[in-house]
Amino acid sequence: MISVGIIGGSGYTGKYLVQFCLNHPEIESISIYGNSTAGMTLHQVFPELLNECPDYTILNVKNISFEHDIYFIALPHGEALNFVPMLINQQKKVIDLGGDYRLDNANIYYDWYKINHTSPNLLQLKVYGLADFLDNSFYQNSLVANPGCYPTATLLGLLPLVKNFHNNIISASTSAYSGTSGAGKSVKPDLSFSEMDRNVKAYNVNAHRHQPEIEQNLIKFGFSSPYSFTTHLLPVSVGIYATTTVFLDSDMSKENIREIYNEHYEDSSFVRMRETPPNLKWVVDTNFCDINVNVNKNTIVITSAIDNLIKGASGQAIQNLNKIYNWDETAGLLKGVKNVSVH
Amino acid sequence: MISVGIIGGSGYTGKYLVQFCLNHPEIESISIYGNSTAGMTLHQVFPELLNECPDYTILNVKNISFEHDIYFIALPHGEALNFVPMLINQQKKVIDLGGDYRLDNANIYYDWYKINHTSPNLLQLKVYGLADFLDNSFYQNSLVANPGCYPTATLLGLLPLVKNFHNNIISASTSAYSGTSGAGKSVKPDLSFSEMDRNVKAYNVNAHRHQPEIEQNLIKFGFSSPYSFTTHLLPVSVGIYATTTVFLDSDMSKENIREIYNEHYEDSSFVRMRETPPNLKWVVDTNFCDINVNVNKNTIVITSAIDNLIKGASGQAIQNLNKIYNWDETAGLLKGVKNVSVH
Amino acid sequence: MISVGIIGGSGYTGKYLVQFCLNHPEIESISIYGNSTAGMTLHQVFPELLNECPDYTILNVKNISFEHDIYFIALPHGEALNFVPMLINQQKKVIDLGGDYRLDNANIYYDWYKINHTSPNLLQLKVYGLADFLDNSFYQNSLVANPGCYPTATLLGLLPLVKNFHNNIISASTSAYSGTSGAGKSVKPDLSFSEMDRNVKAYNVNAHRHQPEIEQNLIKFGFSSPYSFTTHLLPVSVGIYATTTVFLDSDMSKENIREIYNEHYEDSSFVRMRETPPNLKWVVDTNFCDINVNVNKNTIVITSAIDNLIKGASGQAIQNLNKIYNWDETAGLLKGVKNVSVH
Amino acid sequence: MISVGIIGGSGYTGKYLVQFCLNHPEIESISIYGNSTAGMTLHQVFPELLNECPDYTILNVKNISFEHDIYFIALPHGEALNFVPMLINQQKKVIDLGGDYRLDNANIYYDWYKINHTSPNLLQLKVYGLADFLDNSFYQNSLVANPGCYPTATLLGLLPLVKNFHNNIISASTSAYSGTSGAGKSVKPDLSFSEMDRNVKAYNVNAHRHQPEIEQNLIKFGFSSPYSFTTHLLPVSVGIYATTTVFLDSDMSKENIREIYNEHYEDSSFVRMRETPPNLKWVVDTNFCDINVNVNKNTIVITSAIDNLIKGASGQAIQNLNKIYNWDETAGLLKGVKNVSVH
């Protein structure tokens, strides 16, 4: 049983983190730290949690206790730089849900985030926690960079193909769609209900910070072809749907490609290979990533869907927690208990 | 530990019933029986449950086993008449989620459902399971009629006032709003996405089957004033929002009225009294009923919100199960475990 | 042919005003005046109007020209007080779309708006422009107060009944539902897409500024019974749906009541009496108010639906313009030209 | 002034066709023919049109009169084969909004539609009416095949690039998103509001009938690279958003590419080149196609948006009508009259 500190628990992601922790069989105590919400109680910030879970006061992020075993950080990018080195120095384990430690290179970080990285050594030491792609042996280090929501959906769909066929790829492109909660709780005029109702729009074309994160991981598996990543906003609040088109230099059989995926994910608790393109709602409120691979001669179309706040953030963070401690990967993450006998 | 049979588990309500049962600490086995889905597996009917819970074959409703301790019936109205008397004869406990046993009188049943009731004696014996209004002593009989979704939201909001002030009420009217899932999975042209997107409409005005169900319960608490109940469809899939306006024959103090409600529900696990009108989304995916009471001289406006599929159906059914067996009323119904210490 | 000045034309309402004016057969020139948008062009403020209509620069509201024949004012409440007296002094006609001149009494205005009215004499002189309820003879004065969106839907539905049966009404209550655009373009955290998606909530219960506006008009037709008005926000961007329940002191025949409404609105271009409760989407993007009256003994349920930005604001303003000048009431407001022969 | 026959005017597309025709300055009479709706009136089929336009009886499609000058056909695919040859034989002009005459080759038609084409000679004679890409000189023949909704959005975005750089394209792929109205009014379980709310899903991957239609037109402009086209359903009722990614064999300057598009569409009334990716809602209820081209070295991302029922069907059909008769291309299609002077 461990003690957990949650730094920045009053956003959309933080809410799920708290709920998962409260429901986790191996967590015996939690503290939550906030900035603007310090001094408020959890139920004041999230009225929907009244009676659902115990209430407690959000502590001030300036007074973080070092008594916890592990810390989740759910802060806007740039802010984790103020906490991670300190916690690592205290021999603590850290799972950072933001973007500050995902890239391996401080220069690339600067190019995309316009911030000078103050602990570049940790960029090399961290584990990039794409949980369904790593076995537990990878989790030796103290710092896990939890992947971004778009990269999670995209990479889980694309990496098995890249791993096997990187030399045969002519090009690949991802067209990805996100619900509005990806932008967080902050108020933006173009994300009002009146503006987004009935609306769809591409944004940050060729300029989204998740692009170098995806590319860095594709390259690790040998990918060196043209790649493009385009993001869109949808009139849903939750979810990411990523459609990736890959052209190969020769035709492939469906059976061959599907076998690669099925083998790759056969032991996975949270990646579900599908016979048809997934429905986004199949994964909403879950930690699953649903993937379909369609093969037509040399054209591969991969569709993958996740809940951006869970699989793309807090759920995957809990999955990483479970892997760090060698617990059952699904601990705290499934709704249905599995020991009911069914006739 | 008990064994549960679910008859009609492949609709929207059935899905939640199965999930709650699989997650329930006191249920050791379940069987699910269906008509058109008999022979299919749960994962075929609900692809989103893959990996979330064990798969199993839906049994044919014609071959119901009597080995279970209790049966949930989630069938279209009229069909429960074919099962309930048989099960009661077999000394089984039954919770019927449909409308066939909610009314006390077979003639009124005929007037509203146009079906001759074939077991009118059970109408008198049944418990009308408005769970948050009954203590466990009420659950002596074998048959519980689970309240309708609209009556649940409306009565939980209105009954405490009626109980105390029925002699002072000039009139009361409820304007209630439902998501489309209340109509079930069956296909209706006017409930297609293209038709309901951006749409709102009143329906069954002065003619909704939930009206006599509400009135029957108001009358039990002494209500004898004019009452009207109007239902609407909203462009949301889940939830009911009921706004009830009551005019009294003299002015009331806010404190007085609120105290009545707070006292009434102070031990309730699932009714949450609110300082402001509830947000529908606070209760979606939960078994809560959130209620606000606004007092302005002699005008009382009560707003109440529930998830129609959970509090208005399967969740309340589980709550009734818990009350029948004298278990913790919240068993299987809350997401957050309460024994985590919080600092 | 006239010249029109639009003061405050860069909100949701202003956009429609501009479009209606550009499409109006009797308007030969328009100018639009703004505050924060002064100096921008119409196409910059409303990118969707590119190529749809000519572009032009929004003029500064501080430099309003008196060359126009009539002025539409679409400003937040309180601000019209700075323009209306000046324009009336210049012998101009004014249609104010805000709330500043709708109430007849400066004290009541203060109670609800917390602003001291600086031209209370105009409160008496103005016409309350509920267009479908007034014939052209009412439009003698220079100032028209365009009704609020909720009052328009509510009063058009309720006044014919009140006019005929005010002595027989036990009580009346309206439960009304609005899309988010009623809150205007300003940014509010609780109106973000992430917050309003799947949400419904009552607001300003017993405290909405449109309540005294409705009551003032009910009283004019003899109403003196208890009345309550409750407003809700829906997850749609456009539209108002008002459901009013009236209890009478004796039973009525459906035919009698319907005849009263049909007679009342038989010459109306924009009120459409319906056999069933209206669908909100029937009126979206139109100047229609659709009304259904359901009679069940002594209970009358009136449902009415409008587009809040058109019938509840800019469209009714144009209708008022047409009535002021004795033009065809529908000029500029219908999509379908009527002189095509149809076989 | 002409007379128009509309065959199949009771679907979503037919409604707009009727409205555009009623509003068209050069159309003096219309008749509408239907199957299942024959004998009903327009207002019965579309209650929202009451008072908006004259009512009239829908005639039986079996009794089509040959008195009209031109016929619009808005029928499910396969059915136009029964009407088009007959009308062409009668020397009539025909604009077919369905898929039966869009492809040039009867064998390819069979491959995708599984129907033997009974008038393959007309496949060669027809004009493929991508209106913004053709000047009026192309409209010599009597039969116009109105493009599909996806091809309209995709080709208007992609063809200018293909025309200029077809030899330099490594690959191109389109990820396109449609509202549910594209499926028509027919009832489908997976398109109910309860199912599509919050949902997104790819469908017909590598198998959509619009794919050969797009490819046929790309090939005409010299395209011979790998191309893929993936379609998705969104929880909106109206609109198509198409994102096309093109990789070139060398880097391009933004200025160069944008100049090509701006020149190409500088005289276009309905294609609006945008500096940012379009918002879908900018084009809803209009005949516009909004396009943005983003250039990043050798990667071009083209986003285009249309209203599927208007620009993707009835609006483009009217635009084609205007081009056939050499009328102003915008006749009947714009809301704002342009002769109002603006100061």
Image: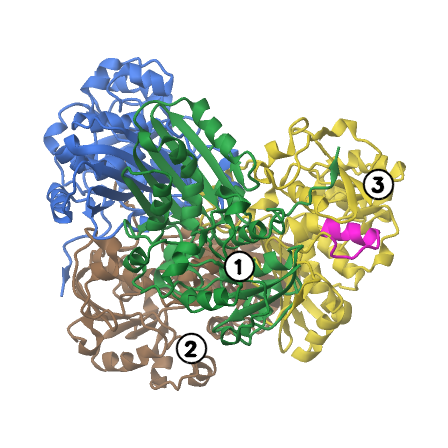
Chain colours: A blue, B brown, C yellow, D green
* Residue C327: in magenta span: yes
- Residue C11 visible in rendering: yes
Tag 3's secondary structure? loop
Q: Which mark is residue C207?
A: none
Residue at 21% x, 29% y: name it: A218
Highlighted range, magenta: C316-331
Which amino acid, mark 1?
Answer: Val
The N terminus of chain B lies in quadrant: bottom left
Which residue type does callout 2 highlight? Leu
Q: Amino acid at mark 3?
A: Asp
Mark 3 → mark 2, Cα distance in angstroms: 66 Å
Check the image and report above or below for D223 versus A220. Answer: below
For label 2, the SS is loop
Which is more foreground, mark 2 or mark 1? 1
Residue C252 visible here: no
Closer to us: D156 or C315: D156
Q: Is residue C86 above or below residue C25?
A: above
Q: In terms of sequence position, does the residue under pointer 2 or pointer 1 come before the other?
A: 2
Horizontal and vertical percent for residue B122?
34, 81
Front position in the image: D299 or A25? D299
Which residue is labeled 3 in the image? Answer: C69
Depth order, front residue of B312/A226: A226
- Pinpoint the chain carrying mark 2: B
> On the image, numbered disc 2 is attached to which residue?
B103
Q: In front: A181, or A113?
A: A113
